[in-house]
Amino acid sequence: MKHILLIATGGTIASRYTSTGLSPQISAGDLLSFVPEAKQICRIDVTEPFSLDSTNISWKHWLRLSDLIRQHYEAYDGFVLCHGTDTMAYTAAALSYLIRSSRKPIVVTGAQKPIDLPDTDARTNLLDSIRFAADDRAHDVCIVFGGAVIAGTRAKKERTKSYNAFSSINYPPIAVIQDRRIIFYIDDKEKVSGDAVFSDRLGEKVFLYRLIPGCDGTIPDVLMDRYDAMIIESFGVGGIPDYGDGSLKAAIHNWITAGKIVVMATQVPNEGSDMSVYEVGHAVKNIYDIPESYDMTLEAVIAKTMWILGKTKDRKEFRQMFYTAVNHDLLFL
């Protein structure tokens, strides 16, 4: 039997109702007690590095989780990470960059309702995750949720209450799980070779600037000294508005002149960016050669930017790494 490590970090799946709302209180061992069928699938050990509502998860926790998996990597055949849903897509994306080319599966899951309720998605999600982690074809970081297996860089939470909370953005699901059967759409483990590559640093000084009509273009200049990179979440396929004062274009110039990283992303989840389509994007892209997200999720763009900044702040090296595909994060190339 495969040997799996279950890593509990809190979240709704491990929560109980209190007078002030849901709070993570169910231990890793107790989580397993709700899915006794799991012992027929594989051997499972448990650990609980922390127990948090995922709203409180930060980049520091991503590094802790990556290091925990690194420490136990040789001892287990796969890993199941129980996590809150609100920041699950960020964590899955971050782990995709911190742990690359893993022939062992690192499965992230959670639930919309606590596991101790009679009507919950938690038991199904946890069992599906354990089943997938024990499959010979599984590898790399993914999210298993609502019967879908989603690459760790492609997941986005699109529903706050429904059991099918997560979607695979601009990429098909890796697999689906139905009636205890795993149906693979993408079976490419043979393409993963060598040892897993772990990273232990992130550049956390990343500023996300979401544009709204009539936004103040001087805001980036005010924050420039505090950040190493700015991700501009623009409209549609991507462009820089000009409301008559040229302030946002000037701010981009100032950031780049100061050696900072500027990345263009889009507020639209599906189909991606393409700054070359409209004049408002084309001119800026040509002048400053700004990297853009194309078909990447915003969560992946943020996590990848932090991962690259942990290695280099050189704009040329950043661009090269940003456009190198990791765990299915980028297709446009």
Image (cartoon, rainbow, N blue to C red):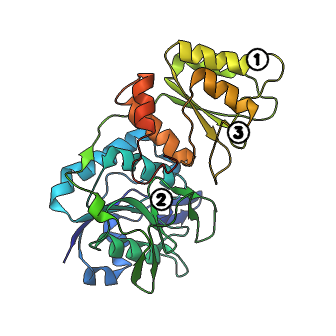
Q: Which mark is residue 277?
A: 3
Answer yes or no: do the residues labelled 1 and 2 have beta carbons within 8 Å? no
- Comparing 6 with 173, the one in front is 173
Residue 201 point in image, percent of width and height: 33, 34
The N terminus lies in quadrant: bottom left
Assess whether mark 2 and mark 3 are in contact (beta carbons under 8 angstroms).
no
Secondary-structure class at tag 1: loop
- Counting every numbered tag in the picture gives 3
Task: Give the label, 1 or 2, closer to the camera.
Answer: 1
Mark 1 vs mark 2, CA separation in Å = 44 Å
Local packing at callout 1 (Cα closer than 10 Å; few below 14, some 14-19, many 20+) is few
Marks 3 and 1: which is nearer the front? 3
Mark nearer the N terminus (1 vs 2): 2
Q: Residue at x 57, y 36 (%)?
A: 292
List the residue tagged with mark 1: 246
Q: Is residue 303 visible?
A: yes
List x then y, in percent, for residue 148.
Answer: 49, 71
Amino acid under label 1?
Gly
**Residue at the extreme bottom:** 179
Going by the picture, which residue comes out furthest to the right?
244
Lower sequence index among marks 3 and 2:
2
Residue of label 2: 11
Q: Residue at x 39, y 27 (%)?
A: 317
Amino acid type at circle 3 is Val
**Image point (51%, 39%), residue name:** 302
**Neighbour tally class for label 3: few under 14, some 14-19, many 20 plus, Cα within 10 Å:** few
- For the residue marked with disc 2, what is the amino acid? Gly
The spot of residue 131 in percent (x, y) is 34, 76
Q: Position of residue 146 (x, y in %)?
A: 52, 72
